[in-house]
Amino acid sequence: MNIGFIGIGIMGRPMAKNLLKAGYALTVYDKFAQFDDLVALGAKPGTSNKDVAAKSDLIITMLPNSPNVRDAVLGKDGVIDGAKPGTIVVDMSSIAPGAAQEICAALKEKGIVMIDAPVSGGEPKAIEGTLAIMVGGDEKAFATAKPILEKMGSSVVRVGDIGAGNVTKLANQIIVALNIAAVSEAFVLATKAGVKPEAVFNAIKGGLAGSTVMNAKIPMILDGNFKPGFRIELHIKDLQNALDTGHALNVPLPLTANIMETMQALKTDGMAVNDHSAIVRYYEKLAKVEVRK
Ligand code: NAD
């Protein structure tokens, strides 16, 4: 099977590398970023989204947000212009569930099937090939895509119809954002009270407060390393999609609204391209203390 991979960014690059490592024939493309390293590893270079689609039986997209996926799939020289009927599009970006449904419907008119398959785990798990992948859409297309997705993730779960993958991802993103905020607030308190943050981490990480988020983010915070990873501007995008989806369904999201404003403050402070572990800097500024080694 020929696979196309569009969107060679922080996540897409290591994910595409894992598919190459697994022996798949890959055509790759990014509208703005270079992908010479993947070509050096054996990938064929695509010249446009349309060109990738014309050369592939299954096309993976890993792009920032709904407008980017619309552009790459339905826009000028897009996937829809190159793909043959029967082609499967697997959108692994985190986008609005409604946008996934609309793009899927437009593709369906040309006999192209789309499933949504956003991921959780960040760059380290993308490199390891151990992402958690949450899938929505056609069961037959899922069965075809599953062995390919398993080369990028250690958990691949179909959660429902098209859009359900992204609904699940929105839930994931609310939990991650608020978990980082809780960890940040708590560690700022402990540090200002004079207890070493490393000691606090070692004491509580195995208890009920411990979490994958704490294990991933506290070492970065202690080092003052806010290099992304997952950029605050992308998390703002996810929270906006969560708030829009919630409001459309009459679901108030008070905690999500609160952490959204924290992230907006960090953006105003010039931290939009920092890792979301920089949420701690908001709390540090309030308390005038730094959680460092
Ligand atoms: P990124 O910005 O590093 O990569 C996206 C790539 O898409 C860029 O290289 C960009 O040039 C390319 N692109 C944009 N529009 C395009 C178009 N029309 N045609 C072709 N290429 C186009 O972002 P990322 O961090 O790799 O994230 C990708 C997606 O995965 C996002 O939806 C993000 O929310 C999600 N995600 C990211 C992480 C993380 O830790 N970085 C974790 C889980 C999920």
Image: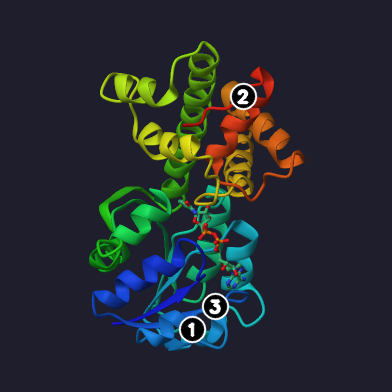
Residue marked by disc 1: 36
The amino acid type, in three-letter code, at marker 1 is Asp
The residue positioned 60% from the left and 57% from the top of the image is 66
Residue marked by disc 3: 80
Badge 1 local density, few (<14 within 10 Å), some, or many (20+)?
few
The residue positioned 32% from the left and 20% from the top of the image is 204
State the mark number for residue 283: 2
51 on left or right of 89? right
Q: Looking at the picture, how far across and down is residue 252, in whole percent?
A: 60, 23
The amino acid type, in three-letter code, at marker 3 is Ile
Q: Quadrant of the N terminus?
A: bottom left
- Tag 3 secondary structure: helix
Q: Looking at the picture, how far across and down is residue 73, in whole percent?
A: 56, 72
| Quadrant of res 89 | bottom left
80 on left or right of 264? left
Q: Nearer the viewer, residue 155 or 228?
A: 228
Q: Nearer the viewer, residue 64 or 121?
A: 121
Measured in 3D between alpha carbons, the distance from the residue under mark 1 to the one under mark 3, in whole angstroms, is 25 Å
- Tag 2 secondary structure: helix
- Ligand 1, seen in the image, is in the quarter at bottom right
